[in-house]
Amino acid sequence: MKKLLVLSLFLSPLLQLQAQETFGMASFTVPAGWQMTRTSETVTLEKDSKKGMTCKIIISATEKGAVTTNAEYLQYRAKNGGAGVSYQNQRGAVTKYEANGLTSFFSKGTMTQNRKTVTSYFYSLSNGSQTLYYQLLTTNNECITEFNEFMTTLTMELEQAGQTNARARKAAPAAPAAPAPVM
């Protein structure tokens, strides 16, 4: 009995590290060492960084309506993409992915915050009838790897013939890798 109690105390924190969080139709795992804050509209995951550094993931509540075209994505991004973010507008600046019953769009932008450049990686994720967004805000590439790990755990409920419990992995691939160091 004593061994069982010690074993359960040892394994409990390990199970909590990999626990799936649910927010609306999205499920995900919080990266190790990140803090989570919930409101009715968003979940914010934030990494303790060096002073002046930003490393934040924002996940929105699910909204009715599908985002399936570039034009719909651009309208959705304008509404939800953050005040003051300048997104690339040239051809090819918006990337669309479709897989496992989900449609995802991606674009990259920048803004200035406290005299530092903040990069925004903005994604929409739609299951055909509902859409959510998730966004990485970062001042450097220190949290790209953790964001990519977060994205591998992100799933969204599918609505199939009256069922709402089927899940599919997100349709977008990983965020761009950090640039190679300049020598």
Image: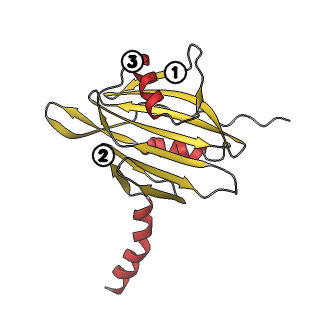
> Which badge, 1 or 3, comes first in the chain's sequence?
3
- Observer able to see residue 174: no
Q: At 36% from the left edge and 21% from the top edge, which residue is drawn?
A: 68
Task: Please provide percent x and percent y for residue 62.
Answer: 32, 39
Q: At 47% from the left edge and 45% from the top edge, which residue is drawn?
A: 58
Give whichever of 16, 105 is nearer the camera. Answer: 105
> Which badge, 2 or 1, comes first in the chain's sequence?
2
Q: Which mark is residue 94?
A: 1
SS assignment at label 2: loop
Task: Please provide percent x and percent y for residue 175.
Answer: 56, 35
| C-beta proximity under 8 Å, tags 1 and 3 | no
> Which badge, 3 or 2, comes first in the chain's sequence?
2
Q: Amino acid at mark 1?
A: Val
Q: Disc 2 marks which residue?
A: 24
SS assignment at label 1: loop
| C-beta proximity under 8 Å, tags 2 and 1 | no
Residue count near mark 3 (Cα–Cα under 10 Å), binned few <14, some 14–19, many ≥20: few
Instruction: Look at the image and tell me in which quarter the C terminus lies.
Output: top right
| C-beta proximity under 8 Å, tags 3 and 2 | no
| Residue 88 versus residue 153 in the image, above or below | above
Occupied quadrant, residue 8: bottom left
Q: Is residue 99 left or right of residue 106?
A: left
- Observer able to see residue 68: yes
SS assignment at label 3: loop
Q: Disc 3 marks which residue?
A: 69
Q: Amino acid at mark 3?
A: Thr
Give whichever of 151, 65 is nearer the camera. Answer: 65
Q: At 63% from the left edge and 35% from the top edge, which residue is drawn?
A: 111
Q: Is residue 126 left or right of residue 165?
A: right
Give the Cα distance between marks 1 and 3.
10 Å
Give whichever of 68, 28 is nearer the camera. Answer: 68
